[in-house]
Image (cartoon, rainbow, N blue to C red):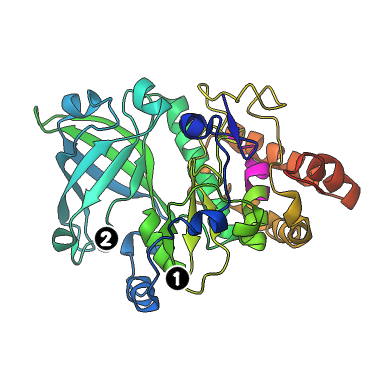
Amino acid sequence: MRVINGVAAVAMTALFVGLPTPSLTAQSAAGSPPPIKAADSAKVASRAVPLFASEAPLAVNITVNLKRLRSDRDTASPYRSATMSYAGADGNPVAVPLKIKTHGIWRLKHCDLPPLRLNFSGKTTKRTLFEGLEKPKMVSVCRDADGAEQDVLKELQLYRIYQLLTPSSHRARALRVTWTDSATGKAKETRYGFVFEDPAEMAVRLGGKITKLKGAQADDLDADAAAVAYVFEYLIANTDFSFNGLHNTELVAKPDGSPVIPIAYDFDFSGAVNAPYATVDPSLPIRRVTDRLYRGYCAHAASLPAALALFRAKKDAIYALYADEIGKLLTPGNVKKSLAYFDEFYDAIKTPHDVDERLLRTCVGRR
């Protein structure tokens, strides 16, 4: 397996084996993304998405042909017609038609219900909680089991932590989903899942657009934002990402041409979740997903102290997320394990010597 930018990126291996990875600056000479119009960003950024106005779990019923959906195991599987309903403010059901398709890599092949991409139509979502949503991703249980549900909730917590640390991250909302089979009309399992912000919506909220250029190097990334992102990945012990290869990551470009903002997502392979199916790229110098490995750029070392100060300042707020309405959905044992795991992170960044030994010794590039 090829490691891109020192990070496991299974899906990107074939694209980079034997090939150089030029920086975005070098790539721009061959063809830059379309220029970003500030007016476009302002227009979309002003559009509120009611679903993310609250973090309280939302009970929904999704009606879809479950047998057909569960049989869609190809990356090119089509969208399937569905309906999502919830109780409105007056207590009456609000039903919104949408389309759903399966997606993913590992979970697409191995889960009873793979991750889903939702596709809403603007006309049908007006004056509903889903107004403003386009094609968000939905994370659901891999299997109808309590342990799998706890893994979903643990991953949701990581999105909440990331959003607490920086707005340059995906907003997420917990859903209490009852699945109803449209073929039989019978309700099946009810489990927690969550929806997180569509990349395009997130980008315009930040005043930019998603750029699909690959090969980002240190100079292409906003150093301060990159330091926060890499420290966050170290906090949760995630190595299943690559900003260079756009694996479980996104890059947001601003109209002023400033360095792009790196944003991570998809944390189920992290040590903080420690899912039973999670593995580590064998080319990395760690053997367990719970082993932490810092993969930030050495060139961003000057931004690291401020990033670490942010994490220290937010420690109490991060821990408080495990005692609130959503945090209490985790079992007491999982809460205890999560906080103890974060304690290890804070022990690793206590002093400059600790930071040098635990983080900077594995940074990418020359120091």
Q: Amino acid at mark 1?
A: Gly
Residue tagged 1: 207
The residue tagged with tag 1: helix, strand or loop? loop
Identify the disc placed on residue 334.
Answer: none
Contact flag, marks 1 and 2 (Cβ < 8 Å): no
Q: Residue at x 32, y 76 (%)?
A: 43
- Report the residue that reaches farthest toward the right: 353
**Compared to 232, does 14 lie above or below?**
above
Q: Nearer the viewer, residue 75 or 34?
A: 34
- 86 displayed left or right of 251: left
Three-letter amino acid code of the residue under disc 2: Leu
| Label 1, label 2: how far apart the Cα atoms are | 23 Å
Residue at the (78%, 60%) spot, across then down: 302
Horizontal and vertical percent position of residue 106: 42, 26
What range of the chain is rendered magenta? 231-239
Looking at the rendering, in which quadrant would you find the N terminus?
top right
